[in-house]
Image: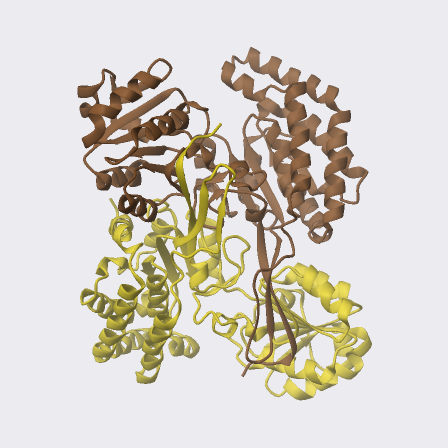
Chain colours: A brown, B yellow
Amino acid sequence: MNYVLNKGILLKKAEEEFSTASTEDKNIALKKVSESLENHREDILENNAKDIELEKKNNMKSGLIDRLRLDNERLDGIIEGINTVIKLPDPIWKSDKVWTLENGLTISKMTVPLGVIGIVYESRPNVTVDAFSLALKSGNCIMLRGSSSAIHSNKAIVKAIKEGLKSSNISEEVIQFIEESDRQHVYDMLKANEYIDLIIPRGGKGLIDFVVKNSSVPILETGIGNCHVFVDKNANLKKALNIVNNAKTQRVGVCNACETLLVHEAIADKFLPMVFEKIQSIVEIRGCTKTREIIEVKEAKESDWKEEFLDYIIAVKVVKDIDEAIEHIQNYGTKHSEAIITENFTNAQMFLRKVDASTVYVNASTRFTDGGEFGFGAEMGISTQKTHARGPVGLEQLITYKYLVIGDGQIRK
Amino acid sequence: MNYVLNKGILLKKAEEEFSTASTEDKNIALKKVSESLENHREDILENNAKDIELEKKNNMKSGLIDRLRLDNERLDGIIEGINTVIKLPDPIWKSDKVWTLENGLTISKMTVPLGVIGIVYESRPNVTVDAFSLALKSGNCIMLRGSSSAIHSNKAIVKAIKEGLKSSNISEEVIQFIEESDRQHVYDMLKANEYIDLIIPRGGKGLIDFVVKNSSVPILETGIGNCHVFVDKNANLKKALNIVNNAKTQRVGVCNACETLLVHEAIADKFLPMVFEKIQSIVEIRGCTKTREIIEVKEAKESDWKEEFLDYIIAVKVVKDIDEAIEHIQNYGTKHSEAIITENFTNAQMFLRKVDASTVYVNASTRFTDGGEFGFGAEMGISTQKTHARGPVGLEQLITYKYLVIGDGQIRK
């Protein structure tokens, strides 16, 4: 029996009792974990420093080093995140559908935990705590596989979590961390259908593609966002400019940032110079031929329409109408978040109805696609697939349901 | 570009227009299809006779020949099934969740089609029509891959469907049938993530295991049901006997039939002879050691606890209490349908809460796990997985959703 499956057995055993844990027990456990993280603050920061030192020697890029780094303030934020989850309503054992058949059987569709969630993630050690606390609150056990670059940080964090659980009524076995960095373990997780009910990859395109291609366990594909803002002929250009600026520059390294701007040809002469003036000092603009007849920018290549830049770069294309805009989005988008800026009612409705994405906007920034902004309290990522859950994944997306059928001797005729 | 991907391209093209088709256009198209099937009755039956003849030469078992056979009455039933689907409410572009954020953004969670559904199925040609009509009503395009044994029947049926669509406002391209029997085509479907949004396998364990193991397209695992009835100490034995008899014998070749009977030891002496008398003339009983001390039956082997007999065979085990019953179900069940027969309130609640299955019963036959019985009108199968949809899969499980966000210039702070 291999390393991963052994962890799987422990989780499935823990699941039996844990799946029906009370909200009170779960909240107390989360509180104990947050206190334990506080108590292990020094140990966690020391181990994080070890990871940073090693990765500096490995010449990791400074942006990635920053994602890996923990300090007192970031740890405060992580611990505070647990308190947010404690305050969220428990999503388990609820129903909004109870009905009675002619034969007298009463059927209730009840929410229940998925069972065991597997997370395969890169770099950021805060994911260890965030994912654990969402899994725990939704009654799910969790198997975590972080990247080797964060191994010391993650081990210290998991140790603190387990010590917190020890002083609660929840078994410390509900969390299992893959300590060995062997890539084979990821592969084993993806094939562990008997032990893992859902796998969520969190990281770059390479990781996500690997998981999609190889997993026979159901997955929740997250994160890749090639998002567009289309500025229609009848747009209020002041609103449009604010939204484009916000969607592109408010934070660039995130999946809901705007990567391509589409501009209706009838207003391109007026709007593109406004965009240029507003963002060109900090954003590299790559334009189509028509764009470059209006503003002096680099040429956009075919690959630029496909790219999730995650950087201060934007591709700009002039389109002849809303149909061309929608067609471009269907061809190049990743079904994440798409926006139209328009005052035209019919065009707004057409865009909302026709664009196939998790979240479609009229006159607002794509940056709102986020569990926190949506009011879900916290999120496990943004799903870009259509099955199971789409868009921000909060507690209510980490569950399944079962039907209870209550009878008095009914048999089928 | 290969055969399957070419079909996929046609479907994705058809999807663009079809996904927003009106309910009226969809219902008219279904009506036209039912009329066309009526008009092609002779052709369909002739082609079915061809399949039957070929499979008789291939020495197909008589049970399978019967599943393959169409006659006027069965065709009436298939056509009538379309009329049932016409009457069902359209599941698309509805919402039960609309909310407004503090910043004034209004978010609506709207139901939308999945896009393209792939069905990989065995033998029964009625699936071709049933799956098509459910897909069409839910706004989904469909790729069908039936078994080679039904190839002539299926081709004749698809031809009739397409001719029906031609006289409607829905493109005939919304249905694509894989005509070549090459097994490689199934494999290609399972890897066609760009063109197929969900694959539903319908058939035996071999087919389903192959699809689970090889698909990188999200799947809906259906059908394997190793269902249990547990007769508790405090059961009303008359109710229990009726339910066991019904769950085992009302129809044996179905996934919601009972395969193992678990009996509390305190009532085994009394109940097992009742079961024996009731069913032994038509059902082969395979018992555990304790069972065989009470009634004279064959010995159950370890493999019998795992087996979905789909036949007039039942395994019987005496258990010392509800905990052992639940443990046995968790070890051997397939998370399909599980029943407890009891008058004890606390045990009933414990069973409902603890047993992890799509449908859990108190004092009723497992045979009710069915889209029609549940009131869904029709079904695409019974899901035994936890993600996306669990239990009977009706129109409301063949969809996804997207969020519409309506703003007036909002940007993220």
A344, above or below A54, in the image: below
Q: Quadrant of residue B356?
A: bottom right
Q: Nearer the viewer, residue B192 or A263?
A: A263
x, y percent for residue A385? 43, 44
Quarter occupied by the N terminus of chain A: top right
x, y percent for residue A29? 75, 40
Q: Is residue B341 left or right of residue B68?
A: right
Q: Nearer the viewer, residue B326 or A232?
A: A232
Camera sees residue B153: yes
In percent of the image, x 26 and y 53: which residue is there? Answer: B17
Camera sees residue A2: no
Q: Is residue A323 left or right of residue B213?
A: left
x, y percent for residue B233? 79, 75
B139, above or below A101, in the image: above
Q: Nearer the viewer, residue B16 or A245?
A: A245
In percent of the image, x 51 and y 74: which residue is there? Answer: B373
Q: Is residue B219 left or right of residue A136?
A: left
Quarter occupied by the C terminus of chain A: bottom right
In percent of the image, x 50 and y 53: which residue is there? Answer: B388
x, y percent for residue A54? 60, 14
